[in-house]
Amino acid sequence: MIGVSAFRWKHLPDGVYVLNLHRIGDMTTSKLDPNVYSCSAENLHKHLSFLKECFTIISLAELNQLISTSPKPDKRYLLVTFDDGYKDNFELAYPILKSLNIPAVFFIATGLIENNELPWWDKVAYLIQRSHIQKIKLPGWEETVEFKTNPQIFIRLILNQIKRCAAPIGEQIKELEDFVGMPSPYPDAEFMSWDDVITLSNNGMDIGAHSHSHDILAKLSDDQMLFELSHSKAILEEKLGKPVKAFSYPVGSKNTYNDCVIEALKDNGYEIAFNFHPGVNVNLAKNRYDLCRFPIEYMMDDEALKKMLTYAKRI
């Protein structure tokens, strides 16, 4: 890989750079979806220490202030976000954030908190890792998925087909269970407790909503979609005793939310929302319900991180 020049890195465009992470830890030891792991605790510390020297790190409140007063940012800002609410966010990421004095936003799928049932993507990974199938095509899928390299990629390709398929996710999981055969009961999920979430909120971290069930909003009926937005917000506000104004779209690709979802967010009192597309946010007021985030991936080193940020589109 050709390294990013010192000149280009020094002259990154002004804007708001938002990082998105999910799980923290060792993906190689997990029985669940390895693709959800963003980095190890060691690499999280390295990434954040490096970026702290290069950006002005801001909180969610400071981002909202920027949107109100400086719709075109005049310097390079960085916001750190985590999705889903996995336990390792509290046990591993939170101590690192505290030690570096870095605020972050934790987007919580409220139905997963203190719930022992695995989310659908972890069920897929658990089933595939314990099966011997070499290819699969469920009803409604665009194409057959074949095992070619390693289980992680096989799982990722299957998850992509599930996300694209119009059928409800629950139906597809049942079909997958029937196809591969249930090898054993699912293990317990690995999410935070409400005490964990409250501790984060009371100690300098921001909490946002990530729906209730983590279903794909664009696939739902209007009533189901509205429930996901309003119910998650209501639960968080009741538990935390403070307003919740930020949302991140489950899955977050362009086909997983739409204008109806954005209008519903506005109607339910949300002030800002984040997708899962890389890009430098420069038009803050225009895109406040469609802000981009850079995904941190497991094998990234600082040079790969620099390259991702340097060559990103300005949006």
Image (cartoon, grey):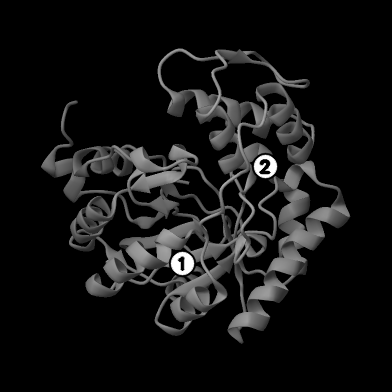
Helix, strand or loop for disc 1: strand
Q: Farthest front residue?
A: 184
Seen from the viewer's position, the closer of residues 134 and 144 is 134
Q: In this view, does 229 lie above or below 98?
A: above
Q: Name the residue under label 2.
A: 256
Q: Where is residue 79 in the image (x, y as percent from the top left)?
A: 39, 62
Q: Where is residue 92 in the image (x, y as percent from the top left)?
A: 33, 63
Of marks 1 and 2, which one's residue comes earlier in the chain? 1
Q: Name the residue under label 1.
A: 105
**Residue at the spot x=66%, y=52% of the render?**
214
Residues under labels 1 and 2: Cα distance? 21 Å
Q: Where is residue 157 in the image (x, y as percent from the top left)?
A: 54, 25
Seen from the viewer's position, the closer of residues 149 and 9 is 149
Visible in this render: residue 151? yes
What amino acid type should be assigned to the residue bearing mark 1?
Answer: Val
**Residue at the spot x=54%, y=63% of the render?**
107
Q: Rate crowding at label 2 as few (under 14), some (14 to 19) or many (20 or more) other CA atoms within 10 Å.
A: some
Q: Where is residue 13 in the image (x, y as percent from the top left)?
A: 31, 50
**Residue at the spot x=14%, y=37% of the render?**
5
* Quarter occupied by the N terminus: top left
Seen from the viewer's position, the closer of residues 89 and 261 is 89
Visible in this render: residue 253? no
Q: Quadrant of residue 104?
A: bottom left
Helix, strand or loop for disc 2: helix
* CB-based contact (under 8 Å), mark 1 and mark 2: no
**Residue at the spot x=55%, y=13% of the render?**
134
